[in-house]
Amino acid sequence: MTPLTLSRYLSIRFLIAICGVLIFLFAMIFLLDFADTTRRAGDMPHVSIGSIATISLFRTPSVIEQTLPFVFLFGAMICFVNLSWRFELVVMRAAGMSVWQFLGPPVLCAIALGIIAAAGFNPISATLKARSDILNSKIFGAEQAHDSDKALWIRQRSRTGQAVLHALSENGDDGTLNGVTIYAFDGANQFTRRIEADTATLDKGVWHLAKVREFVPNQEPILQESIDFPTNLTAEQVKQNFAASADSVSFWRLPASIAQQGAAGLEANDYRLQYQTLLARPALLVAMVLIAATVSLRFARLGGLGVMILSGIGAGFVLYVVTKMAKDLGTAGLIQPAAAAWTPAIVGVLIGFTVLLNQEDG
């Protein structure tokens, strides 16, 4: 067991290093995003510096959350290298302590901070990102209206069968969809008709379609001023599918969002993957701490510090790339979301343990 005083000291040193990296990264991301947003608003004299700064400030936490594994990697490396450079690791070794004893406090801190990041920081960053998107759409709305990435494809169920709805854009004020096309299928999944409408408004289980053109196979097109089309979608589901990606839904809302997507017959792989990724975050942060330890516990004054740092960065980058690849496979439905989220973290922890065991015991 690590003495309580030493555990407290190691934890404080580790937390100081993590906070230092976080502050530096926050400042860099904010300044880069502020500069980019300012450039985009260069031809809009009515946009104030305060509005641009608010957009960047609200958007920065979501970027920080994505780079959190690297924060822990660099923070742990800085902490361990400083301990080695100041002979503190030498003293601990001379006192008969093993690597597992002085790694215990940082690992426990990583687990605790991973839980806080998933359960506390994620809801805050998701809320701020949503507010940033609202401000961004108000300022750059005309630019975003022509963004093809904002087009919506959504599948729904109703009492008459299934349908696939496509919309070109959404009016952020009242949720009205513009440029709507509905492909309707009967209970046997046979195509029955295509409906085109200028606008669609969701209201209590039906879409109110305006300026409608209805195309039925082997029949003349039917033009109508308005019709109602049944649906089981809610306004919340439509907004999530149209404007919000899974990483903009907070940790506590993800289970309900997954259930709603399933009830509407929609794919929820990205929501399930995001939920599992947040659950696996403590394990991934522990993996980064162990990887940092494998390249940082060597006595720094013996030289080779640059090689150690580059090795740690390379190992962390490889783990991060593997995590992103697994996430893409999970989003595409090629592997289970739980496996995509947990496998890289568990493999990283096992590799770190294996290397440390080899270094400790030969």
Image (cartoon, helix red, strand yellow):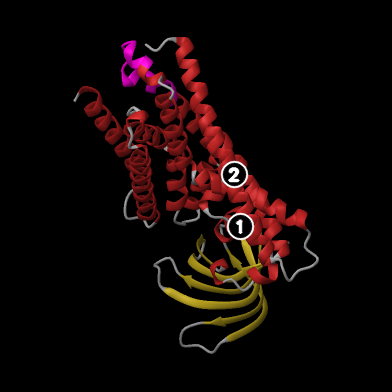
Magenta range is: 91-106
Residue 247, percent across and down? 52, 49
- Where residue 92 appears, as percent x and y from the top left, is 37, 15
Residue 68 x %, y %: 49, 41
Seen from this angle, which residue lies furthest left?
Answer: 362
Label pair 2/1, CB-CB below 8 angstroms: no
Q: Residues within 10 Å of mark 1 (few under 14, many from 20)?
A: some
Can residue 235 be seen in this snapshot?
Answer: no
Image mark for residue 239: 1
Q: Amino acid under label 1?
A: Lys
Q: Earlier in the sequence, mark 2 or mark 1?
A: 2
Can residue 202 be seen from the camera position used here?
Answer: yes
Total of numbered circles in the picture?
2
Name the residue beneath numbered marker 2: 26
Taking the spot 55% from the left edge, 69% from the top edge, the residue there is: 151
Q: Classify residue 172 by image quadrant.
A: bottom right
Q: Nearer the viewer, mark 2 or mark 1?
A: 2
Our reading of the magenta stretch's main secondary structure is: helix
| Image quadrant where one finds the N terminus | top left
Residue found at x 69% / y 62%: 38
* Mark 2 residue type: Phe
Q: Quadrant of the C terminus?
A: top left
**Residue 45 shown left or right of residue 12 in the figure:** right
Identity of the residue drawn at 56% across and 40% down: 122
What residue is rendered at 43% in x and 65% in y?
Answer: 187
